[in-house]
Image (cartoon, rainbow, N blue to C red):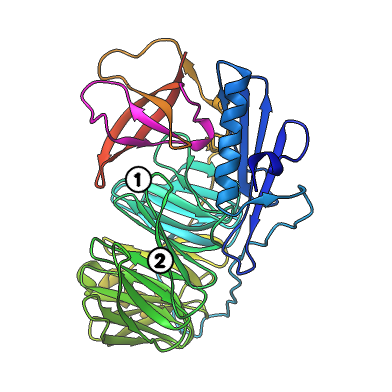
């Protein structure tokens, strides 16, 4: 089919690619108005992302549009009528939560209620992050003070960190960078997979999906490789420099970091519902009431940690000295490395859907939408087992708490007419390469061949922006830190 045959009506061409096996369900629309070419693309049934380019003549604009259309037709896109094909549903994790059977309650120091069931958590030396199914992400201090609120377009599946960059994977199929002052979509994978879980390592995003697929995408949102594991419902993916560890309905499968081969596959005791990793081992929490520790090198099960209900989440203290687990019956457990159970306590809320340990504290996000900070020190746990627990502080939102929404258009970005003084900003520019709009550094002192991970919603060929700072990342690219302003 030629580009001319693909043209639908007037100056607008609308194409769709929808595969029966569920791997692709996306549209691509090109509109030519004089010397301007507008492109809109994304998951069928949503408004999608937009890009606009200007050309010196009408003829060049039409030629550019024809080239874009031809490229998509070659990839399998076909003419369609907008609205005739229904949007494909996004899977939201359905979980049940029963009351705990534990005789004692965990020593919760503080609890913050987000207002919706929460899966996303990340805790580092400076902050705590929680994301819920309403698309709300909150940033808190370790003492529970709420510092910022991010409002994302759809429910948050998980929060992951790569060095000091924080990313939120959402049900709209995008992964948002929350590290700058205003969040932006750093990866857009809605058209390819139904996200279940994410991990990121050196800017490379690893996506586990509903069908048991594993998709690996680089910092420019370009596919590196993909594999289909033997089981469905991939609720675990963990990555390091050596491999990607994929947990699903048939166990855990390890693939070489470059996707060249499968390293090993181990069947677990039940479907994998959550995963964790340490330097030499991965931990799989399963539906059959157990966490299993697998050697990264061979996949051999080295230890098992038996709970009393399906395991929704797990975590470890540094080096795997202690292993923690949260079950579907609102209980939280602690084991020694060899599998000895030290304690079982009620969460005092719902079932822990994700968790993380830091400095004698265990942070939980749960089915009731709470982020809870548990005192996991030996003294506090002994006191709790004997019935003595602190009165948990109920954290409230500050009246003037700032809320940040993602950048959606170039018009939503503040403008400046001059580059700040030395040390006050870095100039980057958008340019077209291979049919895609990329971003490179203009300021001196940076590697000119490296591209910049940058919001796609505001990329316009020829536009320049000033960012507070750029940091180099393993893999040969730059990431933005701080505010983004348009240079006019």
Where does residue 321 sit, x and y in percent of width and height?
Answer: 21, 74
Q: Residues within 10 Å of mark 1 (few under 14, many from 20)?
A: some
Q: Tell me where residue 363 sits by quadrant.
A: bottom left
**In magenta stretch: residue 441:** yes
Is there a contact, CB below 8 Å, between mark 2 and mark 1?
A: no
- Residue 330 is left or right of residue 57, and the answer is left
* Residue 355, label in figure: 2
Mark 2–mark 1 distance (CA, rounded to whole Å): 19 Å
Please tell me which residue is depicted at 46% across the width and 84% down the height of the picture.
102
- Residue 150 in the image: state x and y as whole percent: 52, 43
- Asked if residue 152 shows in the view, the reply is no
Would you place residue 241 above or below residue 467 in this image? below
Q: Nearer the viewer, mark 2 or mark 1?
A: 1
- The residue closer to the viewer here, 337 or 17, is 17
Q: Position of residue 241 (x, y in %)?
A: 24, 60
81 in magenta: no
Name the residue at 44% across, 22% down. Answer: 485
**What's the mark number on residue 121?**
none
Q: Secondary structure at mark 1?
A: strand
379 vs 350, left or right, is left
User: Closer to the camera, 123 or 237?
Assistant: 237
Label 2 SS: strand
Quarter residue 252 falls in: bottom left
Of mark 2 and mark 1, the one earlier in the sequence is: 1
Residue drawn at x 39%, y 41% as measured from the top left = 179
Residue drawn at x 59%, y 59% is 24
Q: Neighbour class for label 2 at 10 Å: few (<14), some, many (≥20)?
A: many
Instruction: Determine which residue is flagged by label 1.
Output: 165
Q: Which residues are magenta?
A: 437-462
């Amino acid at each position: 089919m030629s580009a001319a045959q693909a043209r639908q009506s007037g100056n607008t061409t609308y194409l769709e690619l929808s595969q029966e096996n569920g791997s692709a369900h996306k549209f691509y629309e090109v509109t030519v108005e004089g010397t301007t070419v507008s492109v809109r693309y994304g998951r069928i049934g949503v408004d999608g992302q937009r890009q606009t380019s200007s050309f010196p003549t009408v003829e060049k604009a039409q030629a550019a549009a024809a080239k874009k259309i031809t490229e998509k037709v070659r990839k399998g896109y076909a003419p369609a009528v907008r609205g005739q094909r229904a949007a494909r549903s996004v899977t939201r994790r359905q979980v049940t939560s029963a009351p705990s059977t534990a005789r004692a309650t965990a020593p919760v120091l503080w609890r913050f209620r987000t207002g919706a069931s929460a899966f996303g958590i990340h805790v580092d030396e400076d902050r705590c992050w929680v994301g819920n199914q309403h698309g709300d992400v909150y940033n808190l201090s370790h003492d529970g003070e709420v510092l910022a609120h991010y409002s994302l377009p759809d429910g948050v599946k998980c929060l992951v960190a790569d060095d000091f960059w924080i990313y939120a994977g959402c049900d709209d199929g995008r992964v948002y960078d929350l590290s700058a002052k205003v969040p932006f979509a750093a990866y857009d994978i809605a058209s390819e997979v139904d996200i279940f879980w994410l991990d990121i390592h050196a800017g490379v995003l690893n996506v586990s999906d509903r069908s048991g697929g594993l998709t690996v995408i680089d910092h420019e949102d370009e596919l590196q490789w993909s594999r289909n594991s033997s089981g469905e419902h991939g609720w675990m993916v963990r990555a390091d420099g050596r491999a990607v560890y994929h947990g699903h309905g048939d166990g855990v499968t390890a693939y070489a970091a470059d996707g060249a081969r499968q390293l090993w596959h181990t069947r677990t005791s039940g479907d994998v519902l959550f995963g964790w990793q340490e330097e030499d081992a991965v931990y799989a929490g399963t539906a059959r009431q157990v966490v299993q520790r697998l050697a990264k090198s061979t996949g051999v099960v080295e230890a098992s940690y038996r709970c009393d209900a399906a395991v929704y989440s797990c975590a470890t203290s540094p080096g795997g000295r202690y292993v923690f687990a949260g079950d579907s019956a609102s209980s939280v457990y602690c084991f020694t490395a060899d599998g000895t159970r030290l304690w079982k306590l009620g969460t005092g809320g719902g079932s822990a859907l994700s968790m993380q340990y830091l400095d004698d504290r265990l942070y939980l996000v749960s089915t009731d939408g709470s982020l809870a900070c548990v005192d996991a020190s030996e003294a506090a746990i002994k006191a709790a087992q004997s019935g003595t627990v602190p009165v948990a502080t109920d954290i409230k939102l500050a009246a003037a708490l700032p809320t940040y929404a993602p950048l959606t258009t170039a018009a939503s970005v503040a403008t400046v007419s001059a580059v700040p003084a030395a040390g006050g900003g870095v100039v980057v520019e958008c340019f077209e390469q291979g049919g895609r709009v990329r971003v490179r550094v203009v300021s001196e002192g940076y590697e000119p061949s490296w591209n910049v991970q940058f919001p796609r919603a505001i990329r316009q060929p020829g536009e320049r922006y000033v960012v507070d700072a750029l940091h180099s990342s393993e893999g040969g690219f730059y990431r933005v830190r701080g505010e983004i302003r348009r240079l006019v």
